[in-house]
Image: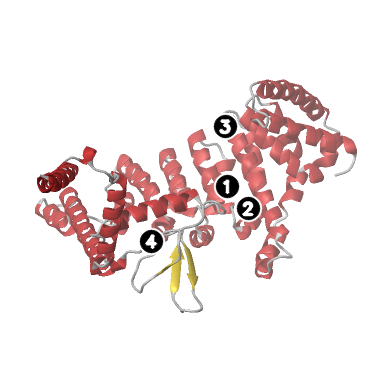
Amino acid sequence: MSCCVEVLSIAAKVNLLVLLLSAACFCSCLSDRIPEFALTKTEESDLKEESGKESVAEDDLDPEDLEAFYPTHQWQTVRPGQAVPAGLHVRLNLQTGEREAKLPDNKNEKSDIKDQKKRKRLDEMHIHSNSFTSQELKEALAKMKEKEKTDSTVEEKANLGDVRKRFRPIEELKREFEELSMKIETDFEVMVKLIHQFNSSASTLDEKVAALYDLEYYVHQVDNAKDFLSLGGLQLVINELNSTEPVLKEHAAFVLGAALSSNPKVQVEAIEGGALQKLLVILATEQPLAVKKKALFALSSMLRHFPYAQLQFLKLGGLQALRSLFKEKGMETLYVRVVTLLYDLIVEKMLLEEFQNKEDQMEERIQQYRQVNLVPAVVEQGWCVIIANLLALPEHDTREKVLKTVRVLLAACRDGFQVDHALSTTLSTLRSEYEELAAEEQKEGDKDGYFKELLSSVNTIIQELGSGHL
């Protein structure tokens, strides 16, 4: 009986042990299938970090990424051929002899905002495993340059094509004109025809006038004026100043003045051809206003910057001829022109004398001007009073030019101006008038206006005349 009991207790213990082992196996199976029943749970972030480390480790082994350098806050060796982003700290390790780089320490240093943005952009570019190698970048740049050349060539061809569509070659135009029995003539050829038309006895008065009118247009150019001289046209025009037809005199003087303007060679030929004498005769005799106006224009063109002509002008009584205009009725419009001419000639000599000590090459020209005693002749022939009386004219433009002439003649005409009571009264009247006009200008915001300048000229003349010395 005791043996049976002992056997039963051993069997019970074995059954209990089997039951415990079965329960343990069942719990282990549940923990493998459902994480919630697991005895230990692995966090997802830890898994991601591990997977990230594994991917980075795998990328480091990829030979295509050797060109990209991935910076950290720890010093890393920069391998040959790797592109280092901007803004990194780079050093040379003296122990190993290798270059090392790392990100700046934000706690102790402040990097530039632009560098941070650039580094961020470059880092984003190098994150991907398909970053460009240096060879690929060179090839891409070469293709860009080739494309630019191709585009520019295409654009030039397009522009050239557009120009050809809009304009036709001169050879094609000449062929078409020849087919139409037309011919493109040069200025020289046109002047030859005009001179022939003017000099022909078969031409009517209107045709001659038309020829002179067209010639005036061409001889404005210096080269055309020289060609006009070589063709004999200048002497024909000078001779026409003796014509009995006022309209021919007028247009001949107009052509002469245009050819003389700033053309020394033509000036010399004209004075040798007797043009100065003929012009002075027209100004001194009774002629229509239009004729005298053009003659005065031609005279002005001849005298300017030509001291020899100015000397001959004084010898031939040119000032008397100009003074006669002030005695003739209906010539008031020429007064300002005459005064302006005298002012220009006086100032021209004064300006040249200022360069006497600066340029030795001008010495010969200065000697020529010293022979022209224009100012003494002006004073001797009573021009001081004539010019001063013109201040009574109502036009402000006329007064401005007369005031300038009075100022340049102050030293020479001082005695005459001081005893001229009419001039003193006129200057006082002008000062009062221009004070009011200058004040109105200043109210309108124009501090340095036209009338203020005129007032300054009047005050200067009054002050210098009243001071007793110049």
Q: Secondary structure at mark 3?
A: helix
Can you give x and y, in whole percent of width and height, for residue 250 in the image?
45, 41
* Residue 172 seen in the figure: yes
Q: Is residue 356 left or right of residue 51?
A: right
Can you give x and y, in whole percent of width and height, for residue 147 in the image?
21, 60
Query: Which numbered disc covers residue 313?
Result: 2
Query: Which numbered disc covers residue 227?
Result: 4
Q: Secondary structure at mark 4?
A: helix
User: First in sequence: mark 1 or mark 3?
Assistant: 1
How far apart are the two marked residues, 1 and 4, measured between alpha carbons? 26 Å
* Residue 382 seen in the figure: no
Check whether the beta carbons of the residues at disc 2 and disc 1 lie within 8 A of each other: yes
Q: Quadrant of residue 8?
A: top left
Can you give x and y, in whole percent of width and height, for residue 251 in the image?
42, 43
Q: Bin the neighbour count of mark 4 within 10 Å (Cα to Cα): few under 14, some 14-19, many 20 and up.
A: some
Which mark is in front, 3 or 2?
A: 3
Query: Which numbered disc covers residue 62?
Result: none
User: First in sequence: mark 3 or mark 4?
Assistant: 4
Q: Is residue 68 left or right of residue 184?
A: right
Q: Quadrant of residue 249?
A: top left
Instruction: Residue type at mark 3: give it.
Output: Thr
Instruction: Residue type at mark 1: give it.
Output: Leu
Instruction: Residue type at mark 4: give it.
Output: Asp
Q: Residue furthest front?
A: 1
Colour scheme employed for the rendering of this structure: secondary structure
Rendered position, 397 above or below 165: above
Q: Is residue 372 left or right of residue 233?
A: right
Can you give x and y, in whole percent of width and height, for residue 399 in the image?
67, 31
Instruction: Residue type at mark 2: give it.
Output: Phe
How far apart are the two marked residues, 3 and 4, measured between alpha carbons? 34 Å
